[in-house]
Amino acid sequence: ERGWQCLYRSILRKAIQKDRKALPSTLPSSSNINAESHHRPVCQLLSGSSSTAYARDKFRKEALIVRRSDFKTIEYKIRKGKKQLEILKMPGVDLVGGASST
C-alpha cells in the first residue's frame, strides 16, 4: 500500500472518531438502545463543517497542487501529514483545522 493512501485513511479514521466524540448522537436520549453504540452516519460527517470534511477537503486540495513527478514535495507533504496525524491522535485535540463545534 502506498504511503499517502495509508496516511489518508488514517487521517480520515481519526477525524471520524474525533467527530463522533464531539458531535451529539442522532438518537433520542429516551431510546432503550445504547446510544454509544450508534453514531452519526459517515455521510453526515463528510458534509458541513466537521473535522472529517475539513481533513478530506484539505487532503484533496493539497493533492491537486502537486505534480506526480515532484517527489520532494510529495515526500514533504507526507511527512507533514504524519506530523498532523500525530497531533490529531493526542487526547486533548477534539477538532481538526477549520472545523467548529456549532
Image (cartoon, helix red, strand yellow):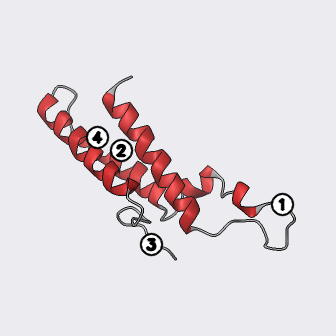
Quadrant containing the N terminus is: top left
Q: Residue furthest left?
A: 72
- Per the rendering, the mark at residue 60 is 2
Q: Cα distance, mark 3 to mark 1?
A: 29 Å
Q: On the picture, is 78 further left or further right than 33?
A: left
Tag 1: amino acid: Ile
- Per the rendering, the mark at residue 100 is 3
Task: Say which residue label 1 marks.
Answer: 33
Q: Secondary structure at mark 4?
A: helix
Q: Position of residue 59 (x, y in %)?
A: 34, 46
Which residue occupies 33% across, 33% down? 4
Q: On the picture, is 13 further left or further right than 73?
A: right
Is label 3 or label 1 in front?
A: 1
Which residue occupies 41% across, 46% down? 11
Is label 4 or label 1 in front?
A: 1
Is label 3 or label 4 in front?
A: 3
Tag 3: amino acid: Ser
Q: Are marks 4 and 2 in contact (CB under 8 Å)?
A: yes
Q: Position of residue 8 (x, y in %)?
A: 39, 40
Q: Earlier in the sequence, mark 3 or mark 4?
A: 4
Q: Residue furthest top?
A: 1
Q: Cα distance, mark 3 to mark 4?
A: 25 Å
- Per the rendering, the mark at residue 81 is none
Q: Cα distance, mark 4 to mark 1?
A: 43 Å
Question: In the figure, residue 65 lies in which quadrant?
Answer: top left
Tag 2: amino acid: Arg
Say whether residue 70 is visible: no
Task: Say which residue label 4 marks.
Answer: 64
Crowd band around label 4 with a 10 angstrom C-alpha radius: few (<14), some (14–19), many (20+): few
Q: Earlier in the sequence, mark 2 or mark 1?
A: 1
Q: Secondary structure at mark 3?
A: loop
